[in-house]
Amino acid sequence: MKFIHTSDWHLGRQFHNVSLLDDQKAVLSDFIQYLKANPVDAVVIAGDIYDRSVPPTSAITLMTQTLDKICHDLATPVIVIPGNHDGAQRLGFAAQQMKESGLHIISDFDVMMKPVIIHTETAGEVAFYGMPYNDPEQVRHHYQQPISSHDEAHQWLCEQILSAANTTQKNVLISHCFVDGAMESDSERPLSIGGSDRVNSEHFKAFDYVALGHLHQPQKKGAEHIRYSGSLMKYSFSEQHQKKGMTLVELDEQGFKSATHIDFTAPHQMRIIEGELEQLLEVGKTDPHADDYLLVRLMDQHAILDPMDKLRAVYPNVLHLEKPGMLMGIEQEVGRAKLARGELDMFKDFFNEVQKTGLTEAQDQAIQSVIEQINKSKGQVE
Amino acid sequence: MKFIHTSDWHLGRQFHNVSLLDDQKAVLSDFIQYLKANPVDAVVIAGDIYDRSVPPTSAITLMTQTLDKICHDLATPVIVIPGNHDGAQRLGFAAQQMKESGLHIISDFDVMMKPVIIHTETAGEVAFYGMPYNDPEQVRHHYQQPISSHDEAHQWLCEQILSAANTTQKNVLISHCFVDGAMESDSERPLSIGGSDRVNSEHFKAFDYVALGHLHQPQKKGAEHIRYSGSLMKYSFSEQHQKKGMTLVELDEQGFKSATHIDFTAPHQMRIIEGELEQLLEVGKTDPHADDYLLVRLMDQHAILDPMDKLRAVYPNVLHLEKPGMLMGIEQEVGRAKLARGELDMFKDFFNEVQKTGLTEAQDQAIQSVIEQINKSKGQVE
């Protein structure tokens, strides 16, 4: 039997004040096409469906449309847990009324103990246990147990599930947590401060597969069958080299058989490009992906007027600009005991930018004399 | 066949900074008990389930629990339209996945045209058409029609439904609007300014029953079968004499048969009580409903220290205090060409309140002399 493991859709997320909803819509549309061509027995979403507990209505509408296509049109069951970004009670509205249509939103511990059973020919009955995102206080309060860390909470919840689970069937756990030793990305929100959110992967080993959410980089941790699918798309520039997509999981009568990463690529990638302005503009003219979301690192060592405008004429989606070149210029001059480029050099750069030509000798002398006068009068005031 | 027509639950509403959720929970619990004893073929909720488009999670949880009991435990279908207080897209999340369990949330015009059909022995097939709350702009935009008023919008939508409806079956319309000539209450939020929200009841006459929401007073308008069920409970003091509850509707093979108001009473009623303080406190001691939500009109014509504290010792839920007695006192004195009670009289009232006794002659002279000095010095400053 096969199922898709995905997580961290973060529908409705903004990135540098740009809405990513159209990109998310495009990736989900590709996903539906994939499912049509490659039917699976279930789709598992391991939390952070939305980017916040009260998502914008446009994100809710996209989620509704996506669920209609998977659950209704393709008749494929969907099993969802809320993540730390979701509002469990909001997401859980009328969940009981959705189950018969194959949409399972597991938003409390009581429902967690009633697995979603999928009957398959190749792996028999497969039980999906969804562990809604929780913090230690919720687990301590609900079970009246002396639980004070995420690790203890997960250990306790895993024990509850495993002691009730039927071991003659395959058991899949869905959880949204930070497994100790796994790799972070810049776009995750910490679950708690100072590393106390880490969970030991040992608690998970007895399951046939563990579908994790929270970390945005696809990865396994602790064992082949304990995995993060990673986020739906890139949510920070530092993820530029991460592969994004979903995980296709296969179980057979022995349990875990394989996990394969399926690539999905958003229309706009997030990339960092670096170089001098003229060189970047030249490359941009023939860049087929010039409308990607870009962080530009300008290496020019002289001041440039309105570099953002110039870049956006070629790369419309430059979202952030860094000028390490200018800093390098400053550092070199600091070496020569000068704190910054002098007023005359700065003005020459500016004049050159605007007039596309250097100063004449007369102009040079005129501006030097102006600068001297200003400096003299500043000296008098100070 | 019988169904319940209800509307305007406004779950999560606050009243004078007091949450009404516990009262709403109690009324809905009584409603579930009623349904257990008196099964019906459907429950229709004609909008304003919540008090705002982003309701508090406690209101969502109450709605989820109520729907679980009606749809799941009692296997009774529920048909819901959003009202002007609800967020249609938020309420419509995953609505397609709820239908098989008998929960029908109708939040767009496409779904409106697909009625919920209930098969009954006594009235044959009954089609429920839910018209989600809409403003004229939405209808104009969706149908590309020159529609500029609520009346035109409703006329157009009714025509769309009636031209598609099967007239051999019974047709019920659910709508959230202001029918022209119907009675308003203080707790409704206007749909638009200046009366342009009014809808002519003529558009509705061809239906077998019209289940209306928006107005908080139970009433029929235009015909016996065009009705408001009124709100779940009282939401303003001016509704103190309104009967609140739900409407039990009966249809047979001829169509509309009867509509009966079923009383539901919240644990705390909203009442206005009026009288002098001592008299009210005396009555309150033996009032079995002393914990109702009260507006108190104090008729005393002299100043009273901390009347709210004194009243709340007997009536814990006094939410608002008016002092028409004080105003009457002022008005009488205005008649005697005095703008207000003098400083000496005010002080005497105060002294009497605190010391439970009048001024001695020496005290009287002392305070008179202080007031004179103050007035003299005020005159000098001015």
Image (spheres, coloured by chain):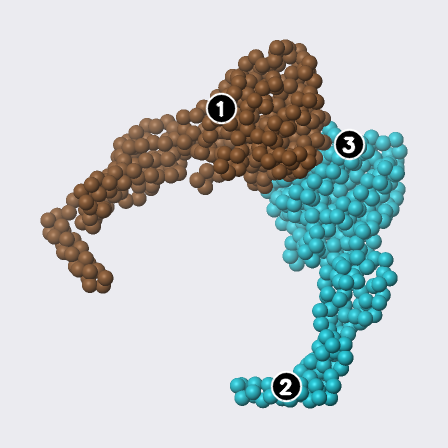
Chain colours: A cyan, B brown
Other residues around mark 1 within 10 Å, as few (<14) / some (14–19) / many (≥20): many
Residue A270 x, y percent position in the rendering: 78, 57
Q: Chain of mark 1?
A: B
Labels 3, 1: one chain: no
Residue A64 x, y percent position in the rendering: 72, 38
| Point 78% across, 72% down: residue | A299
Residue B240 vs residue A15: left or right? left
Q: Which residue is mark 3?
A: A72
Q: CA distance from mark 3 to mark 2?
A: 74 Å
Q: Secondary structure at mark 2?
A: helix
Tell which tag, 3 or 1, sits nearer the viewer.
1
Q: Which residue is mark 1?
A: B218
Other residues around mark 2 within 10 Å, as few (<14) / some (14–19) / many (≥20): some
Q: Which mark is residue B330?
A: none
Q: Secondary structure at mark 3?
A: helix
Q: Chain of mark 2?
A: A
Q: Secondary structure at mark 1?
A: loop
Other residues around mark 3 within 10 Å, as few (<14) / some (14–19) / many (≥20): some
Tell me the amino acid under the disc marked 1.
Answer: Pro
Q: Is residue A375 above or below residue A18?
A: below
Counting residues from the N terminus, which is met first, the one under dot 3 or under dot 2? 3
Q: Which residue is mark 2?
A: A371
Q: Quadrant of the N terminus of chain B?
A: top right
Q: Is residue B243 above or below residue A216?
A: above
